[in-house]
Image (cartoon, grey):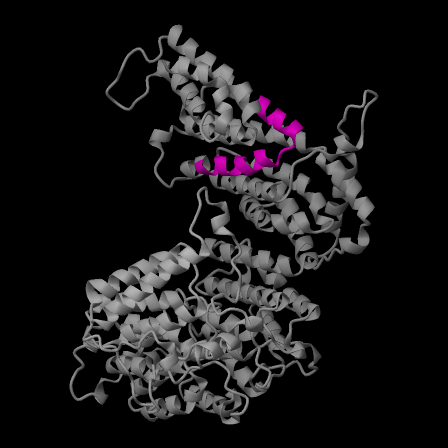
Amino acid sequence: MVTNSDPGHHAHTNPSGRDTDMLDVNNDSNHASSADMSRTTTPDGLDNRSSRTRPRVFPYTKYLPYETETADQRQQDVDEMIKHLYIAVGSGDFVPGAVHWTKEIRGWLSLKFDLSRQQRISLTKLYYELALAPGLEYTVAERFASMFMVLTKRRHYLKPIDDLVLDWRPLYQEIKVFVLPGEFATPNTFSSKRSIRTLTKICTFAQLFFDPKEIPAILDELLPFFSMSPSESAFVVLGLLNLFFPTHAPPPNQPELQPQHYLPTFFHLWSIINRSTFTDQRFLDMFSRLSRDCLTVEHVPFSEHGIYTAEQTSMVFTSILRLLEIPVGQASSPYHINIDLGAGLSALLERDPRKHPASRSIARWIIMSLSPACLDVKDGRSILHQLEGLIQGIETFFHPSNTGAWTKTLSQLVYYLADFFVMRWNREESGEYKMPADRKLTPELRKRFVMCLREVVFMNIYSKSGTAVNYALSTLQCLAFLEPNLILPGALQRIYPAMQGLVEVHRTTSSIRALQMLSRIIARTKGFRCHLTTLLGLALPGIDANDLDKTMNSLSFVQAVCYNIPLHDLTKSAQTDSDGEPMSGSTATAVEWITQQVDRFETEGSLIELDYENELTDEDEEIILRSSTAGFAEFLIAFLGRVFTLLQNLPDASRVKSGSPEENVVNTLPAAFAPLLAALSPELYDIALQQIAKFVTNHVVHQARDAMAFICNTLVKVSPKKALSRLLPDLISSIRTEIDENGAGSSRTSGSEILPRDRALVWNISLLSMCVVHVGSDVLDFQDELFDIAS
């Protein structure tokens, strides 16, 4: 943090604790006064206490079962904590003082309370200073660094540059000790105790707040170290550039800081070391963040290549093809291993590859460079055209039979492409991205993008790699969200044969998982929602004790559907008999329409597109939907029958290993039944109640007592009075019978094994105990019977 006019001066917080102006933002010459700050960072001059640019999506305090502090009380609490933190830092009491109050503030934040904008700015500056202060114990500095990361983790709390500017120099001096040791005559004893991993993580969070006006100073500092003899220093410079270079757009009145001014230099450096994995990943990471941060800035020139030129774009796509490491001819890799071996100490500057995979940087660079200008180019050299060419060129490597080391990377790339596109589309639609109209994504661009990825995703959902399938299913969901009319027809075209058992068994499991991911989009899209009842029926054979993985996926699909639609027989409300009673209609209309659509899927090619918006009138769709709901009762009875058969064939819970498929199925059953029973109409709920009551009364399935008890619990919670009246008399009667007539529970055993004659008693007691919890006051209607049986 710069506190005077000397750009090289850095006011470290020292252990003697004399920097008592740390929390006084008004003393920082790099920032406006708090009144100016409030005016520039809050919409319409609102109060500065509003700390979020994005509202919370869930009102936590509203749904807690107890009263919480008022907003004023919460603010008083955090003010008190900050005051004590200030006193501790000012007096040099870092342990336990500052550490204790840091822990308290962090706990306060974990309760979903929000700091005011000014408090967050002040605390962020403080912890940045403390994390880098010389003389602090290693563990204490780590605590302060962690708190700094918590405060800057989400971008919607603080606007870079407008709200907060951090000085890059103190952090650079700490990291420089590790990667440029030749610059120091003697080792830095304080820095040698630090963790380079922590310092690079701090830099990842702080980089967003480095001032773009410092670009010349950063380049003047780093570029002189660039040398190919030895090459280690060149790799170190590239790593430091990736960590420290400010990617935020410069002010409009300083054209010398525009990306077009320094990008040629970077691409020249890249061309010097162009067959290195390290170099490709570092430059793509930096360029992708640069594209993201300059996307919404009007004074930064933007074309069909984003902020880059056609030659620069071609060079980036060449490096993308290298990073995918797809085998070409006899070559196993496009990289030369000896080049990366010269990276040396620069390996310390690598970001965590699990959190920052190369495919993520590639996707961010592509999506943040797209604009409607890509559609107007005729020579086929725009970002979109080159993306289409890339996907078309590697399409065969997505085929399930063509699996290799590249499979995960390709699946990851396609997933991040779809994920970033959905994120950008939603933020533009919500107004969070304020950008020029000529850069906003359009429906035409969205359609081209979805069509580009459609075929490879359909192939990838049947991959032999479980990781690739997971990525492909998430991608499929993103694409269906963007263009349901382009994705759902092709998905159903592949899913129907798989669900009907006409293709390989493993395709059935992938198809059920795809249905689970698409269920919400199917349920809300005109025409396609008419397929849901049929698809539910086709999923029933998947509930099979001989294939527990498929069983879990089938239950998850039923759960997903029931979270999105109510299960009501709409034909009953439409027709009445001579006595005025509702009567159930027929599914004939829906069956006939579904049959026609399945035939259509078979006859039309893989590029099938359906536009139910124009093909179906609202009246026709309503007739088909009503007809399809007549099959809910039949589905419910068949579903319960399948579940009961499954429970009877499960092994004893005491012999099931933790994390086994059997345990997962038992845990999935209550999760599936909760939304299912809650979605039922009163008539269908009565059917479910009768079926479950009949089963628990006439069967004793000792190994499934816990699963059945949880199912009874979900049943009772939906309609406590009705369910208790039906279940409790039978359960209490069965318990009496077992004790009085069969002598159950008359002998005690020291082991955990339950005697055969006691199993019926344990079954009924387990079910009874789960029926009377979580049901509220309705259980009091049976208090006499319950006290009687307990005594």
Quadrant (top left/top right/bottom left/bottom right) for the N terminus = bottom left
Whole-percent x, y for residue 443 in the image: 69, 67
Seen at 46% across and 71% down, the residue is 158
Task: Using the rendered view, name the quadrant where residue 103 is placed.
Answer: bottom left
Whole-percent x, y for residue 627 in the image: 76, 36
As for residue 672 lying within the magenta part, the answer is yes
For this rendering, which residue is in front, 777 or 511? 777
Query: Number of labelled discs?
Result: 0
Whole-percent x, y for residue 556 in the image: 53, 42
**In this view, 644 is above or below 151:** above
Side (left or right) of 509 relative to 110? right
Seen at 40% across and 69% down, the residue is 120
For this rendering, which residue is in front, 111 or 182? 111
One can see residue 697 in this view: yes
As for residue 391 lying within the magenta part, the answer is no
Stretch in magenta: 667-691
Q: Main secondary structure of the magenta part?
A: helix
Whole-percent x, y for residue 479 in the image: 61, 60
Seen at 35% across and 12% down, the residue is 744
**In this view, 692 is above or below 268:** above
